[in-house]
């Protein structure tokens, strides 16, 4: 599963079902499974697989139970058995409703979002609505005189005042008066399936695209001009489900499952199940999705495999070993310094227009430059070591800051303020901020090589002592969008929009083959590990890959950060973790074997049992990989 880990696939056993046919239903929070047969009802805790309730015998006329239906809270169970309708309190087994129907078969029941209103149907059309709490029956058939019936089950809203009918058409009725309404206009063009958020404030309705609609005003809640596409929502079997907090939306049809983040409409999961999906539900924990098919409940962990520290939204740069993150806050004209170990902002610094900043290799100092001044900050004390005025701001603006590998000098690259201008490079002494050299250049600066040159994204080295490009050059297609230099003297450059990475030695330079080819998409950021044996790359779409520099091969599969706009990468000192900073978060991604094992055990929530292991890793001998006391 792309960027997801499958957790706890659980096969639920039934006490009453030996040799019998059973039907099952998941509660709306995905934590309870109900199984019904002629012999009785069984209730299970999905996480543990243990039976927590139920009763033998349904005390109804002879007949085979149809699909069970649970109400929103999971407290009420509705069933049609033969020619009778029954409703039970699931906790006590007490029968609350017993009603005769006109005939066997062709009848069905469904709960909407209201706690006590049950819809009774015959051959897909409504027979009546029943409020189980009051015993009141109301409504009537809608399509008895012909016309195309909606193919979705009727949906009563959380207030019990409105009924929605979707599927090839979209109808609305006010309850209990059965009066036609036209409140949700956007749903008339997104008419194939609908769902409410748990709080009832928003409706999602969909066809080829999805629309979010304010349930009170009927106004569509748009985000930008892009359509929210859904490739399965027009199928007659399609269903929509919101997570308990409304942050995620799932669509499922037949074997296909899709999940999006609601805030940015970003699709985070495309999944094909082993068989046709009976139901899909989100756990209240906000990160677990469960689906039901046959006698199996499968849990999927939607939380990113990367731990995230949420920081201010803005362009971010990481210190080389992932201790610090400096985040621009353009609205407040400042730069925030975050201690990622403590997960908090520890200092802020003024930052004017055209800000540029960077860390030294040891992560102990940070240069901050804008159109007014250049400052060197001691990160331990957060105090300013020195400050100078930014020169040449009439023609150039700060673009990037690079420390030499020995930390004795800094090159500040100033980009031209007009298309006709040249870059200007300032070489500063880190001890006191003295301007050692300044020179004009037709190409920009870049990171220092071990021998003191600058590696420009334009495919040339620059000698900061002489103030000009040196003769040696390396081939970079149309300029590189990302460049990195290792302490061992290797260079990595993005090589065009197809996601290729070219590797060179600083001496020579000599091209190392083969060219690295991974996930398609232009590379945005590159970073070497402290030992220089690993390289991390990330595309514009947030696809992260790790490369073995010595063998020139990719390690493992690609890691999908789902559209995150990564602006900086860094490795931990022991190479076991990669840090990736985007617009508002810093992700911590384990790549070392021990860290991955720890992460698996933590996310599973319990040590992996032989049964868990067999379900996940059928062909691998069982090992107890979770350390004692973890998780």
Image: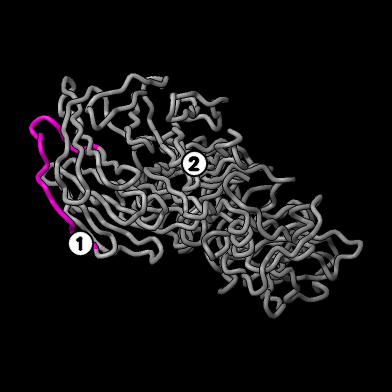
Between the residue at mark 2 and the residue at mark 1, the CA separation in whole angstroms equals 32 Å
Residue at (60% x, 41% y) in the render: 555
Q: Main secondary structure of the magenta part?
A: strand
- Please state which of residues 319 and 184 is positioned toward the viewer in this rendering: 319
Left or right, 56 with respect to 579, comes to right
- Which quarter of the figure has residue 487? top left
Question: To which residue does mark 2 refer?
Answer: 536
- Please state which of residues 97 and 2 is positioned toward the viewer in this rendering: 2
| Residue 389 in magenta stretch | yes
Quadrant of image for the C terminus: bottom right
Residue at (50% x, 27% y) in the render: 500
Q: Position of residue 67 (x, y in %)?
A: 73, 58
Residue at (25% x, 32% y) in the render: 464
Vertical relation: 311 (above or below) 565: below
Vertical relation: 271 (above or below) 174: above
Vertical relation: 32 (above or below) 590: below
Q: Position of residue 263 (x, y in %)?
A: 40, 50
Residue at (63% x, 40% y) in the render: 236
- Assign a secondary structure to mark 2: strand
Question: To which residue does mark 1 refer?
Answer: 383
Region rendered in magenta: 382-399
């Amino acid at each position: 599963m792309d960027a997801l880990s499958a957790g706890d696939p659980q096969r639920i056993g039934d006490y009453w079902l030996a040799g019998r046919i059973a039907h099952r239903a998941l509660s709306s929070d995905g934590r309870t499974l109900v199984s019904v047969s002629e012999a009785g009802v069984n209730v299970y805790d999905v996480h543990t697989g243990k039976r927590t309730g139920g009763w033998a015998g349904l005390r109804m006329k002879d007949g085979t139970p149809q699909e069970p239906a649970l109400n929103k809270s999971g407290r009420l169970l509705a069933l049609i058995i033969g020619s009778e309708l029954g409703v039970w309190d699931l906790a006590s087994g007490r029968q609350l409703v017993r009603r005769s129907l006109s005939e066997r078969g062709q009848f069905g029941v469904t709960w909407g979002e209201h706690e006590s209103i049950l819809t009774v149907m015959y051959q897909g059309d409504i027979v009546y609505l029943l409020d189980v709490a009051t015993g009141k029956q109301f409504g009537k058939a809608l399509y008895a005189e012909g016309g195309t019936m909606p193919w979705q089950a009727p949906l009563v809203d959380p207030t019990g005042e409105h009924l929605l009918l979707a599927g090839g058409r979209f109808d609305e009725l006010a309850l209990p008066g059965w009066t036609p309404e036209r409140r949700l206009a956007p749903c008339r063009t997104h008419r194939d399936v609908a769902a409410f958020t748990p709080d009832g404030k928003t409706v999602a309705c969909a066809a080829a695209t999805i629309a979010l609609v304010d349930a009170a005003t009927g106004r569509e809640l748009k985000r930008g001009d892009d359509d929210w596409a859904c490739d399965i929502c027009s199928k007659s079997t399609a269903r929509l489900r919101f997570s308990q907090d409304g942050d995620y939306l799932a669509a499922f049809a037949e074997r296909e499952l899709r999940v999006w983040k609601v805030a940015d409409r970003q699709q985070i999961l495309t999944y094909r199940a082993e068989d046709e999906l009976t139901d899909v539900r989100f756990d209240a924990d906000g990160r677990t999705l469960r689906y039901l098919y046959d006698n199996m409940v499968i849990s999927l962990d939607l939380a990113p495999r990367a731990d995230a520290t949420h920081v201010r939204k803005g362009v971010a740069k990481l210190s080389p070993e992932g201790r610090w993150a400096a985040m621009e806050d353009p609205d407040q004209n400042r730069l925030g310094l975050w201690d990622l170990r403590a997960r908090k902002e520890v200092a802020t610094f003024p930052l004017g227009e055209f800000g540029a900043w960077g860390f030294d290799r040891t992560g102990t100092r940070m240069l901050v430059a804008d159109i007014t001044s250049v400052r060197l900050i001691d990160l331990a004390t957060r105090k300013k070591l020195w400050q100078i005025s930014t020169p040449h701001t009439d023609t150039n603006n700060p673009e990037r800051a690079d420390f030499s590998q020995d930390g004795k000098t800094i090159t500040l690259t100033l980009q031209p303020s007009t298309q006709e201008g040249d870059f200007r490079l300032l070489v500063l002494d880190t001890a006191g901020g003295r301007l050692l050299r300044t020179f004009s250049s037709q190409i920009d600066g870049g990171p220092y090589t071990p021998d003191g040159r600058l590696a420009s994204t334009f495919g040339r080295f620059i000698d900061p002592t002489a103030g000009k490009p040196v003769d040696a050059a390396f081939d970079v297609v149309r300029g590189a969008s990302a460049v990195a230099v290792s302490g061992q003297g290797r260079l990595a450059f993005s090589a065009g929009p197809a996601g290729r990475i070219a590797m060179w030695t600083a001496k020579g330079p000599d091209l190392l083959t083969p060219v690295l080819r991974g996930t398609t998409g232009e590379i945005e950021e590159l970073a070497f590990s402290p030992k220089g044996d690993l390289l991390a790359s990330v595309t514009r779409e947030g696809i992260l890959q790790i490369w073995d520099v010595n063998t020139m091969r990719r390690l493992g599969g690609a890691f999908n950060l789902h559209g995150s706009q990564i602006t900086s990468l860094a490795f931990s000192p022991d190479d076991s973790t990669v840090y990736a900073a985007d617009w508002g978060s810093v992700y911590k991604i384990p790549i070392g074997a021990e860290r991955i094992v720890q992460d698996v055990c933590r996310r599973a929530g319990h040590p992996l049992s032989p049964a868990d292991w067999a379900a996940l890793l059928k062909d691998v001998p069982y090992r107890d990989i979770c350390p004692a006391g973890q998780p």
